[in-house]
Structures are given as C-alpha cells and as structure tokens.
Image (cartoon, rainbow, N blue to C red):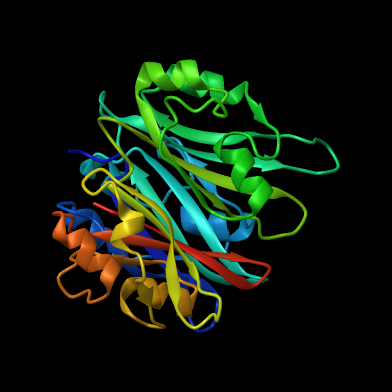
C-alpha cells in the first residue's frame, strides 16, 4: 500500500546556528534524492526548511517550479511535487525542522493541513493552508469551514493543546466536514499543536484516506505521573485494533529507542528499520509487519508534552 508521504527529512541547526544541516531521513527507494539532500544545507529563511525556521510555523509549498525550493530537479526526478515543513521550537530555540514530501499521483488522496487562530480576531480556528493530493472537493470544504474549540480534529487539539488521534472521521458528528470526508474516504486523523510564539494558536492535521494513508499505525506517548518514563496515551493500528491493551503497562525509558531519543533531545527521530529498536512500542509494531517509524516531539512553552509517532 502506498502512503501519502513519500519522504521524511530531519534538519537541525549547526553548532554556530547559522545553517540547517541534514540529520536523518526516510527515503525508501529514492536514494538519489537522499544523496542530493545530504550534500546541502540551508541558511535562515533559505529553502523550505529555512523558511519554516524563519516563519516559526509550518510551511506548505505546493509546487517547486519557480519557487525558493533548492532541489527542484532532484525532486522532479524522484516524482516529488510538494513539501511540508514543520519547525520544532523549545521556546526561542529551534530544535529541528522536519520536512514531508508528497507526489502527484492520481491516486494520491489525503491531507496535511495547517489551522490557526488569532484570539484578537476570531473565536474559531480556520484553515491557513493544506496539501490534499487529488482531493479537490475536500480542499474546497476545508477552506470554507471553521471550528470552535473542542469541535473537529483542529478544534479538539486547539482546546486541549495536546495531540489527538481521531479514528472514525467517517461517522463522527463533530467532524463538520462529514459529507466530503465520506466521498474521498478520509477515515483517520492525527492533530498536533505547533504554536511557538504565544500570539497565535496553530494546529497541524494529518488526514489518512483509505487508499493512501499517512501511515498504518499512529501512537501518542506522554510522560507518566512521575515524569521518568513515557506511557501510552492513545493510538490506532489497522493491523492490531486493541493498542491500549497491547501497550498496557508499557513504559519507555529516557533514550530508549527512537521514542526515548526524541523525548530527551526534543528532536524528531526516524527509523528505516525497526529491527534494532528494543522497546515495547517498536516490538509490537514489528510484530504485525510494520518496518519503519517517525517520531515527532510536541513541545509547548519550552516543555515536552508528548511524542507522536507513526509506523509504515
């Protein structure tokens, strides 16, 4: 099964904090694009990662041609047409920028959205921008929909300031976009809070369609009561529907695998193979045939709140 996101990259500041350097990535068979990426670096406000660094918010670049994107030819050869960059800040300190690349296949359906609210201007959260593949009807609906706190995936993340997984968007009465959701088969969603300046609430949502999901499994891990381990918070897996039972009592120690590393560093982590991961989360995913993972730390007001991970 194809996934909506074809490539995931992580960029981190160099020691002088003048440029972003390549840190890690998932490229699948696109080794040539990986080579082009490893050889480059980005100054502040340069290229897609640098623009996200300067903007302090997610950036969606719908088309690379005649844009500030610096790897257009390599991306074209790899069949990549759009990019989404998410900066991770701890206060004023940039931890990393994670970039997701998508293609333009006719079957590429799903969404990655950026929602925002400025309290002085509105009591609702509205769409800033989004990538939708070929889901044009859903895009039109999204651009004409606003959510109150606690409603829909964007409104729920906004109200709680915590990541959220919605398993059944097809039947949820709180979705507000149900008709267009049903038509294109979007069924699962993950929302991540990503407000870094205190002036505006920003939420990023990842919506999975039946044919081209974001991933096969989503999980949220949060600190336990004593703050010395991560515990399972929520999740969904199309191969193992009872994740809460599977992870009951499971704990992730500091620096344990990709999850523990992302928690301690405040930097996203990827694993192209789960074979070397020893924690309970990775063993469970590998046990149902999943082989790779992405971990995104959620940091609010300089404090680690949760880790969102997904598996392929």
Name the one closer to the observer, 311 or 197. 311
24 in relation to 292, above or below: below
| Residue at horizontal 17 percent and vertical 59 percent from the top | 291
Q: Where is residue 260 shown, x and y percent of the image?
A: 39, 77
Name the one closer to the observer, 92 or 193. 193
Q: Total number of numbered labels?
A: 0
276 in relation to 222, above or below: below
| Residue at horizontal 48 percent and vertical 58 percent from the top | 49
**Quick check: 177 left or right of 296?**
right
Q: Where is residue 57 shown, x and y percent of the image?
A: 60, 53
Q: Where is residue 271 shown, x and y percent of the image?
A: 26, 66
**Quick check: 29 left or right of 27?**
left
64 in relation to 225, above or below: above
Q: Where is residue 31 shown, x and y percent of the image?
A: 17, 57
Q: Can residue 39 be seen in this view?
A: no
Q: Which residue lies furthest to the right in this view?
A: 120
Name the quadrant of the N terminus. top left
Q: Is residue 265 visible?
A: yes
13 in relation to 245, above or below: below
**Quick check: 276 left or right of 73?**
left
Name the one closer to the observer, 28 or 161. 161
| Residue at horizontal 38 percent and vertical 56 percent from the top | 219
| Residue at horizontal 65 percent and vertical 72 percent from the top | 302
**Quick check: 225 left or right of 101?**
right
């Amino acid at each position: 099964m194809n996934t909506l996101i074809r490539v995931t990259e992580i960029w981190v500041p160099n020691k002088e904090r003048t440029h972003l350097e390549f840190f890690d990535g998932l490229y699948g068979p696109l080794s040539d694009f990986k080579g082009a990426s490893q050889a480059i670096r980005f100054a502040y406000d340069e290229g897609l990662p640098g623009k996200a660094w300067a903007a302090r918010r997610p950036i969606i670049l719908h088309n690379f041609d005649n844009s500030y994107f610096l790897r257009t030819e390599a991306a074209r050869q790899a069949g990549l047409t759009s990019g989404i960059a998410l900066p991770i800040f701890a206060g004023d300190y940039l931890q990393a920028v994670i970039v997701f690349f998508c293609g333009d296949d006719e079957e590429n359906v799903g969404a990655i959205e950026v929602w925002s609210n400025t309290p002085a201007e509105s009591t609702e959260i509205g769409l800033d921008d989004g990538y939708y593949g070929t889901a044009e009807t859903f895009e039109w609906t999204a651009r004409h929909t606003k959510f109150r706190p606690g409603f829909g995936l964007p409104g729920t993340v906004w109200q709680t300031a915590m990541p959220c997984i919605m398993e059944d968007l097809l039947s949820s009465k709180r979705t507000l976009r149900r008709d267009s959701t049903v038509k294109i088969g979007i069924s699962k969603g993950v929302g991540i809070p990503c407000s870094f300046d205190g002036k505006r609430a920003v939420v990023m949502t990842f919506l999975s369609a039946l044919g081209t999901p974001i991933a096969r499994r989503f999980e949220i891990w949060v600190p336990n009561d004593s703050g010395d381990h991560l515990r399972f918070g929520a999740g969904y897996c199309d191969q193992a529907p009872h994740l809460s039972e599977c992870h009951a009592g499971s704990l992730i120690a500091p620096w344990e695998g990709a999850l523990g590393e992302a928690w301690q560093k405040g930097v996203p982590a990827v694993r192209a193979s789960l074979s070397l991961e020893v924690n309970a989360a990775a063993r469970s995913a590998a046990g149902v045939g999943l082989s790779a993972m992405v971990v995104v730390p959620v940091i609010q007001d300089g404090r680690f709140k949760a880790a969102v991970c997904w598996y392929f």
